[in-house]
Amino acid sequence: MTDRTATRDDGSDRADRGDRDDRGEVETHVYLCTGCPLGCRLEVDAVDDDVLEVRGFACRRGERYGRQEHVDPRRPVATTVWIEGAVDRRAPVRTAEPVPRDLVRDVVASLRGVRLEAPVRRGDLVVADVCDTGIDVIVTRDLERIGRP
Amino acid sequence: MPITPDRRHLQSRYDVVIVGAGPAGMAAALGARERGAEHVLLVDRETDPGGILLQCIHSGFGLHAFGEEVTGPEYAGRFLEQVLEQDVDVLTDAYVMDVTADRRVKLMSPRVGVHTVDAATVVLAMGARERTREAIRIPGDRPSGVMTAGFAQQLVNLEGYLPGRRAVILGSGDIGLIMARRLALEGVEVVGVFELLPQPSGLTRNVVQCLDDLDIPLHLSTTVIRIHGRDRVERVTVAPVDDDRRPIPEKAWDVDCDTLLLSIGLIPDAELARSLGAQLDPLTGGPVVSGTMETTLPGVFAAGNVVHVNDLADWVSREAQVAGEAAGALATGARRPDQDIRLIPGENVAYVVPHTIASDGTHTLSFRVRRPIHGPTVLRLGEIHRRKVRAVVPAEMVTMKVSPRILEGFRGDVLRVDAIAAEEVAR
């Protein structure tokens, strides 16, 4: 019940409009935190996208994860791209930041044609602003040029 | 980068020789240098140091070691930088053929040929191997397309091949879950993950990120009971299991696939320790170690997955740091601390590492429970120490810090480690 009170306090912008009727009820959503290996079971009380309370976290990262996961779930993406002249044929890459979860497949697909040439260094840019996310894709391993001089 | 000191630079005597340059070996090298070991040699059979981290391209490493999450190759890269800054000799493309009890290390590589070095101390850091089809004896045909999840990971992430078009994964260990996602993102149809146990074997976050996110079904209490296919896998028969984990054939069904990945556990790669004559623990499959990670052979240490299978590289590094420090200290003349207390696994504890500790030392005990307890759990060290945790599951290694303050009043020589539901303790 205290949750409802909190709703009105937090959602003052909506309350001001006096259209409380089209607001949803407080619903509790359950998410499993992926912030660390603990995997806390988070309960997120929210009215639509307004998060009122997060419970069940063991650290601040978990609370943040709960809010983020409810409103805009994001995931780090790691994949590999072709590389010429290195000890291995694939170079590992990742997004510099987590991207929206619904774009994970698109990000991986968009990197499929990329070819790098050794040497590359950790942090080298592979693709800027991948899938219009504003997020870059970078190399995660130093790969020397090998082979005959 | 391929770092290979040539024969001229390779010394004939080292304070510490470390076998394996994965997360354990690199951390051990740093630990040894910190404790004053001048000459440290790190040997690895691959061209680049890093071990299995190089194919673990996903994020999730380093939260403890660096305070932020990085990918496997980045974790390896950061450690390697420190190792090189510390003037550790790194010999790659080299295979350790033999270590004798008086610590003569015989190695072989295309660059230096066969070469023997004398080591004041040795650290074994060879990691673990994957269990294969033979370990669980899956009946049926023997076609191609059956492989371990880690091997598939190597094919995809280092060599650039897909293992097949339509895959079934047996076992929900972390590698299996990670590979389910990896294959799905590369366009392989992942039909499902089948797990014998009633709960996933891997970390919760991997179930969420790797299966739930990609709508890959997880079938618990279900296993593969037959493989079909003449040259290539054509399908597998799966069946639910009863409470005793016996398949129920009447409820079996067939799943079409051309690939079966196995993620059914790791075993310490302890052959070298065995041939050396170090005592092994049948519960872990790795060598018996003291609180400083010394095996039963004086001067021979071991750390990481060769001792017991960890779920985090960060834990491996921490444990190997201890081993490296002790190896470095011993090599430079320090006294070996008395290991006067033996630890034994008690109620609901599968194993405990280390096997012995020093009552005047600070230790981190690592252990695994046999059964999950989904609620407040008391971790008990004999009658002298208790710690409460929120829950325990076999998939997640449990750790407990032990300090001289805790051990101060204890006069015995054996301590049991238990993990018991808090409500049972209260009774």
Image: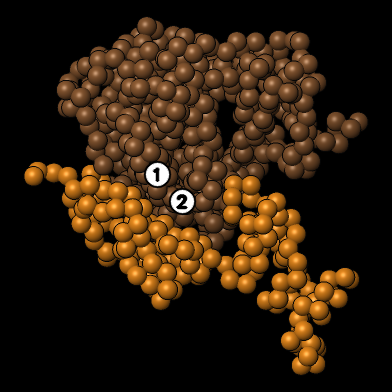
Q: Earlier in the sequence, mark 1 or mark 2?
A: 2
Disc number at residue B70? 2
**Left or right, B376 with reference to B139:** right
Discs 1, 2 touching: Cβ within 8 Å: yes
Q: Hey, which residue is sitting farthest left in the picture?
A: A149
The residue that mark 1 highlights is: B78
Is residue B22 placed above or below A29 in the rendered structure? above
Give x and y (percent) for residue B369.
67, 31
Q: Colour of chain A?
A: orange
- Percent across and percent down for residue B261 are 43, 43
Placement of the C terminus of chain B among the 4 image quadrants: top right
* Secondary structure under the numbered disc 2 in the rendered image: strand
Q: Is residue A36 left or right of residue B254?
A: right
Q: Amino acid at mark 1?
A: Arg
The CA span between labels 1 and 2 is 10 Å
| Residue at figure coordinates x 58%, y 19% from the top left | B291
The picture quadrant where one finds residue B88 is top left
Tell me the subunit letter for badge 2.
B
Q: Which chain is brown?
A: B
Residue B279: in sight, yes or no?
no
* Callout in the foreground (1, 2): 1
Name the amino acid type tagged 2. Answer: Val
Residue at the (62%, 25%) spot, across then down: B363
Residue B388 point in image, percent of width and height: 77, 37
Mark 1 chain: B
Q: Is residue B116 above or below residue A42?
A: above
Q: Which residue appears at 67% of the width and 13% of the height?
A: B341
